[in-house]
Image (cartoon, rainbow, N blue to C red):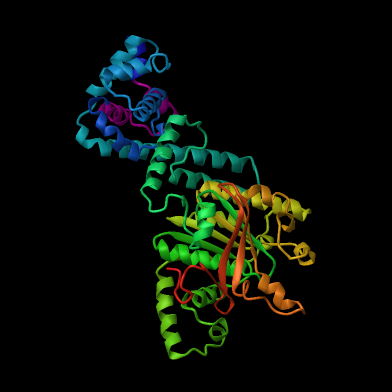
Amino acid sequence: MPDEKKTEEPSLEAYAQGLPYNLEAEQSVLGSVLIDPELLPTIMEKISSPQVFYTRQHRALYSLMIRMFSESKPIDYVTLLDESRGEGIFENDGTAKNYLLHLMEAVPTTANLPQYCDILLEKYYMRGLLTAATDIASAVRQEEGSASELLDAAEQKIYDIRQGRQTSELRPISEVIIGVYDSIYEMNQRDDSRITGLASGFTQLDLMLSGLNKTDLILVAARPGMGKSAFALNIAANVGLKNPDMDIAIFSLEMSNPQLVTRMLCSDALIPSDKMRTGHLEKEEWSKLAVTAQRLASTHIYMDDTAGITVSQMKAKVRRLKNLGLIIIDYLQLMTSGTRIENRVQEISQMTRNLKIMAKELNVPVICLSQLSRAAEQRQGHRPMLSDLRESGSIEQDADSVLFLFREEYYADAEESGGADDSTRNTATCIVAKNRHGSTGDVTIGWQGEYTRFFNLEMNREAPPF
């Protein structure tokens, strides 16, 4: 039966194209599900996408199995045969019956199923590498961009393969539903399911934002002297100490790495910054500094103080981190686009779009600091608003959340009429001006200028956040 032969041996096309492929392993994986449907969850843990299978029929069958699993339908020879009718997987009913029987007969033993899955993944990655190498070579020969752009594109292709991502295929909703279902279940098991992302360490802010969520671009803006850098470093320390295995990348275009570390030590050890600068510490302060240094050294916080860094250069560096969880950039107006754009507004817009794309590609929250224009200085009350974003362009549009830091004490102390009253002394307002995940509003947090430290007002002022 030539038609059945053609269906059973789709590997001929693969071999003709020179693509790595293992027909027997693919058949054994699918056949194992028909023999024992309880094995499907085990397979799904290893093979998350049907694209791991090379042949069209196998991809379609695996997609069908996932859909049936998500719909809580039983999976066996009869039910799969019935569901496959009308899907266009096989040429006719006879071919479908024969091939499904052949899949079960092709399984040597279900005990070796993990090894079969590993073979599939190995061939899948090899095919991806071969395709990526071909695309890269073609782009270089045709000079489809500058050397820097081609290098970034090449690194992105390799990174996507390593992450197991498929950017060239549409995904059926049945695949996505399983991941969403698992995510909802995981949140249900948490102590506080209202926080779906990373906890920043600022309780009320986390509740309003639902935490620092993956793929989000979070803009923190303020006038100079409000404490943007301190706020970002406080978040980095909070996240790093609570998640010791998570990699956190800080790109500082304004301060050097030693300056960043000095600030973090001040905030966490509660040692006045002027003492840290002069080195005149008391005996007990040296002890506190030693303990804090050990705590911070145990985190996976990485720093880069390259001036004028581009988004592409950031991506190239953070891709080397194995367990990336958060990126912090200080600050937007000191970055460069790496391309010739005479209009600064357009350049800023391009960078914010690229930052949002980076957050989505790397699947992590990106916190970017930004300066505000002088408009707030002339306004009564000095309260910042979205229109104050400097060279705004698409900043407001690209950001998922926009936070403004505002301290009345800062302005009150600078005015001739006198200092701030007790209600605003040592406090700051984090204004959530934009929030794609929920409501906007004000969050009041504590501020200790001598330690360059923000903190939760309900917490003990003398205790570090974690």
Does the image show residue 329?
Answer: yes
Residue 221, quarter of picture = bottom right
Towards the viewer: 248 or 205: 205
Towards the viewer: 200 or 420: 420
Towards the viewer: 324 or 273: 273
Towards the viewer: 345 or 139: 345
Image side of residue 463 versus residue 410, left or right? left
Does the image show residue 2?
Answer: no
Give the magenta range.
Answer: 9-33
Image side of residue 340 versus residue 362, left or right? right
Q: Residue at x 78, y 54 (%)?
A: 342
Instruction: Pinpoint residue 66: horizontal percent, then vertical percent.
Output: 37, 29
The N terminus appears in which quarter of the rendering?
Answer: top left
The C terminus appears in which quarter of the rendering?
Answer: bottom left
Q: Is 210 covered by the magenta stretch?
A: no
Q: Residue at x 45, y 64 (%)?
A: 240
Instruction: Pinpoint residue 379: horizontal percent, then vertical percent.
Output: 78, 63
